[in-house]
Amino acid sequence: MTIGEIVDAVQGEVMCGEDRMFEVVEYAFASDLMSDVLTIKMDNFLLVTGLANVQSIRTAEMSDVRYIIFVRGKAVTDEMIDLADENGMVVIRTDYSMFKTSGILYSAGLKPVY
């Protein structure tokens, strides 16, 4: 799926990385535990999380995550956007729950990391 298709599917709002809507991602991982994110040994996956803070962006940076969706309508701060932008990430926010977001993306063809 392209990032643009993902944004449309979850009725998301792009917070940064608007110029990268054509990029393709095949896998997604949903977690609020950043320690679990650090265990993923895969590139080019979408992180779906409700943990909306600077630490989640730092964890994504360490794990080479380029795409993040913040669920449950979580606020994305300017500090988070600036850090994500510096690291070339796409940040999306949706009002949907993690369960609904994951279900929509799975039904649309994204594969689970495991």
Image: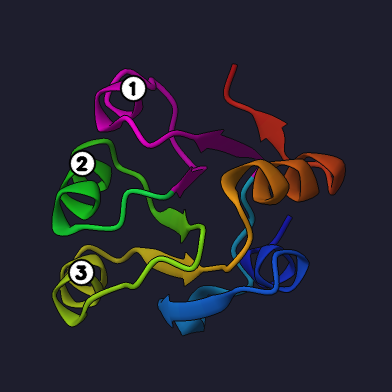
Membership of 28 in magenta stretch: yes
Q: Which residue does the numbered mark 3 point to in the structure image?
A: 80
Provide the residue span drawn in magenta: 26-49
> Mark 1 falls on what kind of element?
helix
> Mark 3 falls on what kind of element?
helix
**Label placed on residue 36:** 1
Q: Is residue 100 above or below residue 29?
A: below
Residue 102 at x, y = what percent? 67, 42
In percent of the image, x 86 and y 42: which residue is there? 107
Q: Is residue 94 above or below residue 67?
A: below
Q: Residues within 10 Å of mark 1 (few under 14, many from 20)?
A: few
Residue 86 at x, y = what percent? 17, 71
- For marks 1 and 3 on the same chain, the one whose residue lies earlier in the sequence: 1
In percent of the image, x 60 and y 52: which residue is there? 97
Residue 90 at x, y = what percent? 42, 67
Tell me where residue 22 sits by quadrant. Answer: bottom right
Q: Is disc 3 in contact with disc 2, using a CB cutoff of under 8 Å?
A: no
Q: CA distance from mark 1 to mark 3?
A: 20 Å
Q: Is residue 95 above or below residue 97?
A: below
Q: CA distance from mark 1 to mark 2?
A: 10 Å
- For marks 1 and 2 on the same chain, the one whose residue lies earlier in the sequence: 1
Asked whether, in this view, residue 46 is left or right of residue 58, the answer is right
Asked whether, in this view, residue 35 is left or right of residue 89, the answer is left
Q: Residues within 10 Å of mark 3 (few under 14, many from 20)?
A: many
Q: Amino acid at mark 3?
A: Met
Q: Which residue does the numbered mark 2 point to in the structure image?
A: 59
